[in-house]
Amino acid sequence: MRRSEKVIISCAVTGSVHTPSMSPYLPVTPDEIVAQSVAAAEAGASILHLHARDAEDGRPTADPEMFMAFLPRIKQQTDAVINITTGGSNGMTMDERLAAPKRAEPELTSLNMGSMNFDYSAAADKVQHWKHGWEEPYVRSSGDRFAMNTPAQIERVCVELGQAFGTRFEFECYDIGHLYMLAHFAKRGLIQPPFFIQGIFGILGGIGADPENLTHFIRIADKLFGDDWYLSVLAAGRHQMEFCTMSALLGGSVRVGLEDSLYIGKGELAPSNAHQVAKIRRILAELGREVATPLEARDMLKLKGGDNVAF
């Protein structure tokens, strides 16, 4: 692993798991996504990971027009790296998932490295009143759906975004097997180092949020990639800050945001993405770790630069 002196803070602003009824602070409209993204960047996030939502009822959408309603505005107001999802939400086709990134030609996109169960149905039990009719069936049915990311689909992303536009990737690895899938594509030459590997812990269907799993994850990635990779870590729900702190202690970077957790502390909803960014930045300062600027993050990850996107 490359142990940089600088920590990259990524902020996942809205995602596709949480619904409007779970938190009044979850950004849904383009205006809300812009405001919270800019504030997160001002708080210290050098990368903004973005999904889109239907402005009327907050459901996840892959519509490129919804992405273009906020991407140029965020770029105008901050120099943060904009990282667009290619995962979308369970049930979206690959053509749908690729439509917005192919329109925007971003510096960075997420790339899930394997198919998996992705069950967040238990979150429905905590909601007393649903704002929209789509929400409860969507959340409860997650236990009967799966996240499809086949090798052929992964190859499409590598070719149609990486080779076509020079886009690089945040490789989302939810389990140890995903590291081996990443190594497979590296061996084929479809992706190039340094690899920005996002270890994801605590999703039901992926690797559990146990500290020993993080050290094992690093050990296997070191075996496969040597010093050709950067570690970043996110953990779902209550494990968020704990695992980010562990990553920083071990020389890695961090990801926070309302996509990953709606909370800022035990039982306390985060008022914004920026509050989570500010909290992890305070922790990093206490640990003596310096936060990377967007320019430094671009240099570390060999990104093409904000002038070379299509928005």
Image (cartoon, rainbow, N blue to C red):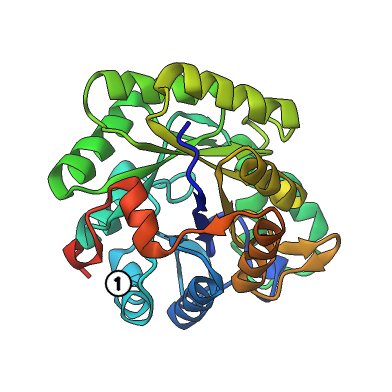
Residue at x 26%, y 30% (from the top left corner): 155
Q: Of residues 32 and 183, which is closer to you in this image? A: 183
Counting other residues with Cα less than 10 Å from the Cα at mark 1, is it few (<14), some (14-19), or many (20 or more)? some
Mark yes or no: residue 246 visible: yes
Q: Residue at x 78, y 69 (%)?
A: 129
Residue at the image position 32 percent from the left and 42 percent from the top: 94
Relative image position of residue 214 (x, y in whole percent): 65, 30
Q: Is residue 221 left or right of residue 73?
A: right
In the image, farthest residue toward the right: 267
Front-lying residue, 290 or 76? 290
Determine whether, in the image, residue 283 is placed left or right of residue 190. Answer: right
Instruction: Using residue 141 as the reference point, say whether residue 128 is left or right of it.
Output: right
Q: Position of residue 208 (x, y in %)?
A: 70, 31
Q: Is residue 62 visible?
A: no
Tell me residue 114's x, y (percent).
45, 28
- Which residue is more in the foreground, 278 or 300? 300
- The residue wearing badge 1 is 68
Q: Indicate the secondary structure of the residue bearing disc 1.
A: helix
The disc labelled 1 sits on which kind of residue?
Answer: Met
Residue 22 horizontal/vertical position (percent): 71, 65
Residue 104, image quadrant: bottom left
Nearer to me, 265 or 67: 265
